[in-house]
Image (cartoon, rainbow, N blue to C red):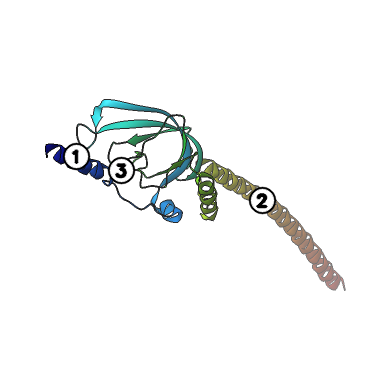
Amino acid sequence: MLKNVLIVIVALFINSRIFACICLKPTLEKEWNYSSHIFTGKVITIKQYSEIYLLGENNHLDYLLIEIQQSFKGFYNIPKYITLIKSHTSCDRNYEENQVYIFYCSTFMGTELMFAPDSCSRTIDTDHPDYTNEIIGLNKLRSNEPQTLNSKSYRIIEERELNNLRNDAILSDELLQKNKILKTIFITLATVLAIIILSFLYKKIFASKSS
């Protein structure tokens, strides 16, 4: 009897562990909209710090050092490395060092802090049969997104605007010089015409007095 009770308890414990995290993976489009950062990266190291806990003293955090290989969304300046935080809950995924994954991540409360995706996300490694199709789908979604400006793009735009301002200034100076020349020519012609008219009137007046 006691043996049967123990078997039932063990079975319930195993089932609770198996079914503790039940979720449906979102479609690629929904995952794209949900995630703030999407990229492929290689797990370089996985380290655990015993003095740091999350949601309980038995729940240590893992720190995953990721070497970013390709960014699809979220980064303005793509860093070479990024650290993801992984907790130990029933929904958390296990990662392996030297393995490449597609990461679907979101920042934590608007900070730069990002948690490693759990088992409910579409995160997969290169050994997964859908890896290539996932990359193709991400490239299509990225091509449909409006282009975001990174710091390099801003510098290019600023340089372009400065060049436009310089060209406008040069054109303004040229126009001012041309206006000065035209004004000088106009004054000269007006002066010459006035002298001719005065000379003609003077001769006419002098001729009438002589007669």
Report the side of 83 relative to 204 (left or right).
left
Q: Identify the mark at residue 7; answer none if there is no mark.
A: 1
**Quadrant the C terminus occupies:** bottom right
User: Is tag 3's residue or tag 2's residue first in the polypeptide sequence?
Assistant: 3
Q: Secondary structure at mark 2?
A: helix
The residue depicted at 43 percent of the width and 55 percent of the height is 27
Amino acid type, mark 2: Leu
Q: Identify the mark at residue 91; answer none if there is no mark.
A: 3
Amino acid type, mark 1: Ile
Q: Is residue 75 visible?
A: no
User: In front: 35, or 19?
Assistant: 19
Q: Is residue 174 above or below residue 69?
A: below
**Quadrant the N terminus occupies:** top left
Q: Position of residue 41 (x, y in %)?
A: 47, 36
> Which residue is under mark 2?
171
Nearer the camera: disc 3 or disc 2: 3
Cα–Cα span, label 1 and label 3 = 25 Å
Report the side of 14 relative to 74 (left or right).
left
